Image (cartoon, rainbow, N blue to C red):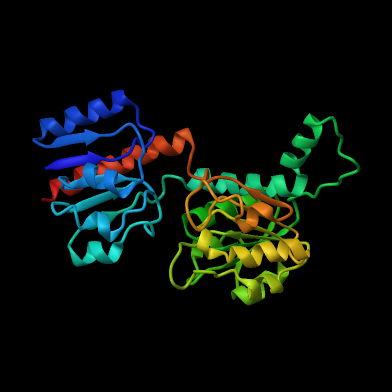
Amino acid sequence: MKISCIEPLGISKEQFEALRSQFESQGHSFEYYMNRCEDEATLIERMKDSDVAILSNIKISSAVLQECTRLKYISVAFTGLDHIDLDYCKQHNITVQNAAGYSTVAVSELTIGLMLDLMRHITVLDAATRQGGSRNNFLGSELHGKTVGVVGTGAIGTATIRLLKAFGCNVIAYNRSHHAEVEALGVKYMPLHELLPQCDIVTLHVPLTSDTHHLIGAKELSLMKKNALLINTARGNVVDMDAAATALKNGTLAGMATDVYEKEPPLQTSHALLNAPNCICVPHIGFATREAFDIRADIVMEHVRQWLNQQ
């Protein structure tokens, strides 16, 4: 079968060549590309003759998939799958498999980092210091003792809870189902409308589905404390970003940090959150650590091997 890795995935040329040798020794062909291109014409060219495609978070539409008539399997080097037309894949018997778990530590650590940055104004004060300024009587806040609401207690949410507990936080949670592992950490589950008013910080860790689209909108923001912080390292559309920007401008939300947006950065400079006060915006870096990329490469290639062995 023909296997195509249509983007670099943080894998070196030497690693790719070793993978090529392995797959060719098993009677398959293996192509790889050392640059990332997202235009549909290039994607079609790279995938059209492939039985297996490997990619991360590049948008794969039905228009692309329609040209890939041999495609049988997609190994996704990413946790979410909302960038792929899964309905088309299901209708045409294309198996799609994600790489769950590779970035659990990376995302949970970034989540804590964003909280600390908002509370201590690390980024803001770095800029002030470089411009000859001082703290100007700024007083930060400590994470210790804060009530943090974790919305979504899958692997990343649970890892974040463990870190928050180590910081001495009081953690409460919302999730569709209750997990014994989380409750064993002393975390109480409650409905979202009950959780939001109690929190100093709300952090989001749910997948993007029809149920979680704009899970945090104007109504939910109005339930939060005026001095509360909102962290989103989940998916952009879990939050109504226009509503969040309005809340930040009106002072009904004290601060926000986000790593995710309606689409992958770069963003238009007119994006609502880029023009909102006390909002940290980073360009989707939660998953992007050297350690996570090494784990990811191992996972996606092992998934390909397992799928090939089943054919």
Residue 135 percent across, percent down from the top left:
86, 38
The residue located at (75%, 36%) in the rendering is 127
Viewer-nearest residue: 309 or 288: 288
Nearest to the observer: residue 70 or residue 220: 70
231 relative to 226 in the view: left or right? left
Question: In the picture provided, is 257 more to the left or to the right than 237?
Answer: right
Quadrant where the N terminus is found in the figure: top left
- Can residue 157 be seen at all in this image of the molecule? yes
Q: Is residue 279 left or right of residue 110?
A: right
Q: Residue furthest top?
A: 14
Relative to 174, residue 148 above or below? above
- Residue 15 sits in which quadrant? top left
Number of marks in the rendered image: 0
User: Residue 215: x and y, percent?
Assistant: 55, 70
Tell me residue 75's x, y (percent).
28, 48
- Residue 296, horizontal then vertical, whole percent: 37, 41
Residue 4: name its quadrant: top left
Q: Is residue 152 visible?
A: no
Q: Is residue 194 above or below residue 227?
A: below
Task: Point out the residue furthest to the left here.
Answer: 27
The residue under the point 19% across, 54% down is 67
Q: Which residue is painted at 60% across and 73% down in the image?
A: 192
